[in-house]
Image (spheres, rainbow, N blue to C red):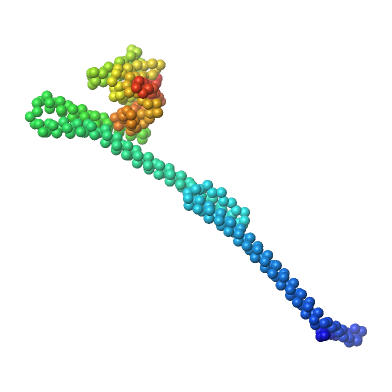
Amino acid sequence: MTFLYVAHRFEENNRILFLRLSMNIGSIMHNFYDLWIKIALIFCITLLMGLYSAYLLSQKIRTEIDKIIANLQQIADKDYKISLSSHFCLEFLEIANYLKKLATKLEKRAKQKRKYTAKIKLISQQRSDVISAISHEFKNPIASIMGYAQTLLDDPNASVQIKERFLGKIVQNGQKISTMIDRLALTTKFENGDFTTHNSSFDVVKMTQDIAQTFKEKHPLRTIKCELPEHFFIDADRTMMELVISNLIDNALKYSDDTITVFIDNESLHVKDNGVGIKEDEIEKVTQKFYRSNSHSWDNSMGLGLALVNYILKLHNTNLQIQSSLGVGSDFSFKLPSN
């Protein structure tokens, strides 16, 4: 058996003394191995705990990153209603807040883009409507002008009566084109707010009778009844009000073969016909510019007649009222501006 000896020299009362200790080397080695085993166990446990903590941390980070990726994909798919929040650490919280701000900005830009795109489409559609309406309405009078003119060119020996009649038709169709252009220009002025009324006091009964007489001379086979009081003075733009009444009577003549009745009731002027009428779901649409009904071509000369009436009446703080039944007839009326 081997021992390990240790001696320690010290003095006491001027005497030199030695303290000797001995221990079995086998016991020392046993204790040394026990200590190393304990240290190794502590190290392994600490290492495992560290690895487990690192695993949990990586999982948490992976979860937060997956959330960020999912929200980024959501934004890429133009879905900006993200609900990202993070309390894991300050850095992820900052990223979450930044993504929310980014989503909000992108949503605003997307809304602006949609509005802009819709506006562009609307302008494009309106432009197409204008071209279509002009093409549709100008086609017949231009064709008539060309036809009559070509006939006169092909037959220079035609009688004076035929020449006068054909030239009259050419002038008539030219005036029709001019009227349509004037209506289009006037509608544009109304829409741009470039028009102001010039009001004066006048007798609307006298004006209506004169307008009706003009239409009677133009359409001698049609009956236009005026059931009006002796006088009714209003304060309005005379030229514009004349345009309103003319359009309403002209519209009634277009879509009715029967008698047209013009009357004033309860301070409202009515133009009533017994014509084709308007479908209930189209009544609100017939005053829209360029509107065309598939059933009864309510185009009002490029769809501007009733649109002009609507604009003018709004400038006079009143509006067009329409009562109509399909196959029965229509009653167009408006409250007369007070004097």
Residue that extends furthest to the left in the rendered view of this protein: 157
Tell whether 55 sits left or right of 214. Answer: right
Residue drawn where x is 46% and y is 47% of the image: 109
Question: Going 26% across and 36% down the picture, which residue do you hit?
Answer: 135
Above-or-below relation of 181 to 94 = above
Q: Position of residue 47 (x, y in %)?
A: 67, 68
Q: Quadrant for the C terminus, please.
A: top left
Q: Quadrant of residue 266?
A: top left
Give the left or right position of residue 217, taking residue 26 as reference: left
Q: Residue at x 33, y 12 (%)?
A: 230
Residue 329 picture quarter: top left
Q: Nearer the viewer, residue 304 or 231?
A: 304
Position of residue 259 relative to residue 294, above or below, is above
Whether residue 305 can be seen here: no
In the figure, residue 62 lies in which quadrant?
A: bottom right
On the image, the x and y values in percent for residue 194 come to: 35, 33
